[in-house]
Amino acid sequence: VVGIWSLLAIGTFSLSFAYPVLLEQDPSVTAYDQYWMMIQMASIEIPGLLVLIWVLEGTHIGRREVLLVLSLASVVVAAIMVFISDKGTTWLHLGSLALWLMVVLPYEAM
């Protein structure tokens, strides 16, 4: 659990520090747009947590299975992000939202 937590913590904290830096490098993104994108990044967690609570409490899926599936999904999304991050700010934002959700949910499930 400590190993999984450490790997997910690296993803969580690196994304929370790197994403604003990537937004600042795009001259077409205004400060208002940067704040709006960061608010979306923070608020995507709320429906994700509701689904996570429903899966853990309402179904017969255990915590280990949820951790495994979401951790593997975060690896897949991170691999996809390598290819789509240079396609524009929209793709960077959508990929970052998906990656944030896939990294934060197993982190929260622990």
Image (cartoon, rainbow, N blue to C red):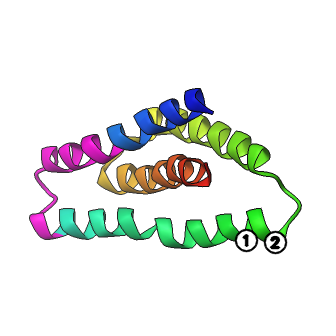
Q: Amino acid at mark 1?
A: Trp
Residue annotated with mark 1: 54
Q: Which residues are magenta?
A: 15-32
Q: Residue at x 35, y 41 (%)?
A: 13
Nearest the eye: 51 or 107: 107
Nearest the eye: 104 or 33: 104
Nearest the eye: 95 or 20: 20
Residue 81: x and y, percent? 46, 39
Secondary structure of the residue carrying tag 1 is: helix
Residue 5: x and y, percent? 54, 36
Badge 2 crowding class, 10 Å Cα cut-off, few under 14, some 14 to 19, many 20 or more, is few
Residue annotated with mark 2: 58
Spot the residue most to the top.
3
Q: Quadrant of residue 2?
A: top right
Q: Is residue 108 left or right of residue 88?
A: right
Q: Amino acid at mark 2?
A: Gly
Residue 61 visible to an observer of this rendering: yes
> Pointer 1 and pointer 2: residues touching (CB < 8 Å)?
yes
Residue 35: x and y, percent? 20, 67
Q: Residue at x 46, y 34 (%)?
A: 83
Residue 86 visible to an observer of this rendering: no
